[in-house]
Structure formats: C-alpha cells, structure tokens
C-alpha cells in the first residue's frame, strides 16, 4: 500500500525520536559519542576557517559515521554491547580525524597497520554478533555450532577487509588520492623488464635513487605504488579476524550452544523494551489502531497494547505487525 505524505512525516519523526532515545540509552556510550562529536565539530570549524575543505569533508563524514551504530540498532531492532559500540566510535574517530585530518597516517609509525588490525577484530565481532542473532531467531531453521560461528565471523571480517581495499584502489584510480600508501623498496623483480619476451624474471637490486626527467626523487630507493601496503593491510586484518574468531570460539565452546551462550558478544533483540511495542491487529486491520500508553505503563508487558477497537490518528498502515516507538 502506498504511503501518504502524512505517513512519511510520521515515520520520519518517529525514527528521529527512536534515534535520540537509542543514543541516550547507555550513559557510557552516550558520553563517548558526545565528546567525539564535540571534538569533530570544533575541528570542522577550524578547518573551514583555514580553508582546508578536504579536511572539512572528512569531518562531516565522521559526524555521519558516528551515528551509524545507533542507526543500525534502530533499523535492525538490536542492542549492541556498549563496549563494542564505544570501540566502533573510537575507531571511526581514530581513522578519519586523527588519521586523515591530523595526518597520523604519516606522522605516527604503523598507525595504518594498527587500525587495519583493529578493523579485522571489529568486523569479526560484528559478524559474530549477527550470526548469534540469526541463531536465536525462531523464524529460522538453522543453528550453527561454535566452530561455524567463528568461521563465519572470520569470513565476514576478511570480506570487509577486501572490499575496503577495493574502495581504496577505486579512490586512488579515479580521484588520484593516496589511500594505498606507497613504500620505498631497494629491489624490484619483474618479467616486464625481460627484453627477450621469454617471461624471465629480471631483478634490479641495490636501488639507491630514482631519477625523473633527470631530477632525483631523494627517496633512497624505488617507490612501490601501493601493492605492499595493500597486502600488509590484508595480513593484519587476517590477524585481527583470527584473534577474535578464536576467542569467540573458545568462549562459546565453554558456555555451550544454548541461547544464553556468549553474553559478552551477543547483541540483544528488542522485543519488550520500554517504549517498543509489537502491533498485532489481525488479517485486515483498520489503518490506524494505536492507543498511546501512559509513561507509567510503558514497562509492563508488550501484550494487550493494540486492540482492533482502538482508533488513533497518525499511525501509518505499513507499520502493522512491526515494532514502533511509543513516547510519553
């Protein structure tokens, strides 16, 4: 059924309210989010005054990314562990603001390597959590053992790592950036240098300098254009994925395959969370059947909230049989 403009406005308003409630639900993650957002806004203003518009773009991008964990939780109706959410927020700040804007990728040795290792760890954690949710869903007929949970988490992390390298290559190729960092090497081995065209690898060792149009680059060697950086990123991503997957495997193996296993890694599905209700109105319900709950009753059971006889204005028909936010 096509949604009216009134329905779309109601959905937009309700989603904003749900996002605000999600951001403020956990005090620890909200404090970290507020501090990071304030720092990014200060840096954004500074970069605009200095006419550094590329850095300002990264600041705007960071602000958007800081909302992503809450957006995912609202859209998927899940609750991420606060520690995981805080780690993701700090990772975004470290990658975009510290890395790109403050040039930590250049100034701090192995900053890029550290972040890619953490990315492998975090991506495995997200993959692990998503599969745990699927395992707990009564509507699905499969149940993965701890070993396959770890395997799926590892594959998910490596897939994210490879896709990110695709993105870096695309940015360098089409927009002439330098996301795939260059490396100075002192030897090259290539069959392209074989003048006989016999696919023989020709080596050039002890390269001390490279001349371009008669001018020295002053690098002390030959400039590799990103291959070593890409492989190093994938290797450390692999290490992070393995560490988390093995840790998750041991945790779940010790606690068993029950639904309460791995509480440290398990996001919570929001069924009867205060302010969230489930609409159950039969096969052919009227379009608007919402009765708002008084604040004192919002912590009670989720049953018995919606009745076919209760009519209210402002409820989009597309929300039947789905959870919506109830505000006092």
Image (cartoon, rainbow, N blue to C red):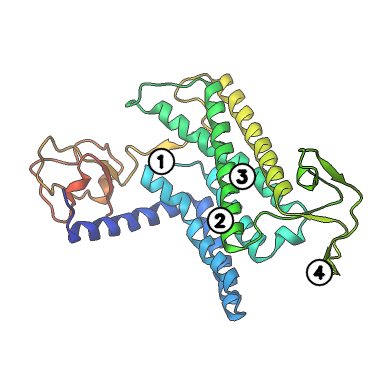
Quadrant of the image occupied by residue 12: bottom left
Judge whether residue 25 can be spotted in this image. no
Q: Nearer the viewer, mark 1 or mark 3?
A: 3
Judged from the image, the secondary structure of the residue bearing numbered disc 4 is: loop
Quadrant of the image occupied by residue 231: top right
Q: Nearer the viewer, mark 1 or mark 2?
A: 1
Apparent side of residue 115 relative to residue 84 in the rendered image (left or right): right
Residue at (32, 27) in percent of width and height: 139
The C terminus sits in image quarter: bottom left
Residue behind mark 1: 78
Instruction: Pick the residue in front: 117 or 177.
Output: 177
Q: CA distance from mark 2 to mark 4?
A: 52 Å
Q: Residue furthest left?
A: 309
Q: Nearer the viewer, mark 2 or mark 4?
A: 4
Q: Which mark is residue 213?
A: 4
Q: Earlier in the sequence, mark 3 or mark 4?
A: 3
Q: Earlier in the sequence, mark 2 or mark 3?
A: 2
Q: CA distance from mark 1 to mark 2?
A: 20 Å
Residue behind mark 3: 119
């Amino acid at each position: 059924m096509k949604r009216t403009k009134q329905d779309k406005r109601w959905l937009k308003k309700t989603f904003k309210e749900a996002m605000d409630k999600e951001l403020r639900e956990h005090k620890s993650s909200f404090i970290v989010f507020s501090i990071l957002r304030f720092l990014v806004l200060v840096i954004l203003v500074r970069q605009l005054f200095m006419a550094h518009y590329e850095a300002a773009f990264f600041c705007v991008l960071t602000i958007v990314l800081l909302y992503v964990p809450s957006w995912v939780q609202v859209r998927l109706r899940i609750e991420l562990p606060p520690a995981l959410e805080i780690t993701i927020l700090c990772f975004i700040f470290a990658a975009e603001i510290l890395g790109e804007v403050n040039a930590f990728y250049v100034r701090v040795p192995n900053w890029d390597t550290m972040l890619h290792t953490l990315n492998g760890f975090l991506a495995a954690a997200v993959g692990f959590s998503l599969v745990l949710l699927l395992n707990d869903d009564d509507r699905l007929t499969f149940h993965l053992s701890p070993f396959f949970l770890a395997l799926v988490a590892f594959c998910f992390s490596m897939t994210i790592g490879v896709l990110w390298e695709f993105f870096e290559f695309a940015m360098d190729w089409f927009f002439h950036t330098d996301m795939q960092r260059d490396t100075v090497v002192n030897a090259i081995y290539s069959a392209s240098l074989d003048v006989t065209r016999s696919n023989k690898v020709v080596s050039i060792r002890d390269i001390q300098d490279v001349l371009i149009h008669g001018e020295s680059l002053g690098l002390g060697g030959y400039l590799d254009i990103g291959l070593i950086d890409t492989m190093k990123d994938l290797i450390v991503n692999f290490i992070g994925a393995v560490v988390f997957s093995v840790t998750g495997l041991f945790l779940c193996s010790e606690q068993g395959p029950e639904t309460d296993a791995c509480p440290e890694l398990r996001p919570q599905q929001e069924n009867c969370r205060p302010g969230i209700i489930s609409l159950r109105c039969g096969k052919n319900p009227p379009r608007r059947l919402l009765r708002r709950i008084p604040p004192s009753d919002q912590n009670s059971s989720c049953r018995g909230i919606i009745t076919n006889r209760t009519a209210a204005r402002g409820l989009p028909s597309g929300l039947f049989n789905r959870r919506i936010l109830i505000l006092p």
